[in-house]
Image: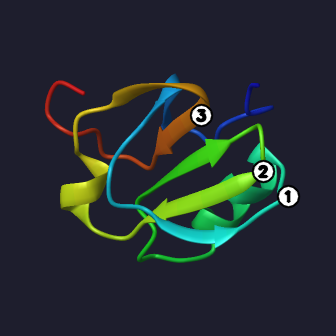
Amino acid sequence: MLVEGLPINWLGYPGSRVIGGYLVGYRMTADRCVALCQLYATCHAIDFNSVDGSCWVHTTLQNKCGAPIPTNYVYHAKKPPACGNR
């Protein structure tokens, strides 16, 4: 599972997730999940699960900058700016 094209300056982490996201929907595409996050200034990052199409948004910088956890079939992506060395 790959996001077709992340927006400019976004960072992508295939095969990982970050704790603390809010579920916003199932049966979505990765691109739709990213587009949804782009619509809201309060969305800092997403986790997309390609098995069930679930989209999880991160609405705090603390969640956005959490350590990525290796997870099969999940893609974590975050808006700029980057979080330290991650």
Q: Mark 1 and 2 residues: CB-CB less than 8 Å, in contact? A: yes
Q: Identity of the amino acid at label 2?
A: Gly
- According to the image, label 3 marks what residue? 74
Residue 38, image x, y percentages: 60, 64
| Residue occupying the point 21% across, 39% down | 83
Figure check: 51 above or below 71: below
Q: Report helix, strand or loop for mark 2.
A: loop
Looking at the image, which is closer to me, 86 or 67?
67
For label 1, the residue is: 27
Judge left or right: residue 27 versus residue 3. right
**Residue placed most toward the observer, 3 or 16:** 16
Report helix, strand or loop for mark 3. strand
Q: Amino acid at mark 3?
A: Val
Which numbered circle lies on residue 83? none
Q: Looking at the picture, how far across and down is residue 21, in whole percent?
A: 42, 61
Q: Position of residue 2 (x, y in %)?
A: 74, 26
Mark positioned earlier in the residue sequence (3 or 2):
2
User: Which residue lies at the image location 27% right of the left edge and 68% below the top edge?
Assistant: 60
- The numbered mark, 3 or 1, whose residue comes first in the sequence reads 1
Amino acid type, residue under disc 1 in the picture: Arg
Image mark for residue 53: 2
Mark-to-mark CA distance, 3 and 2: 10 Å
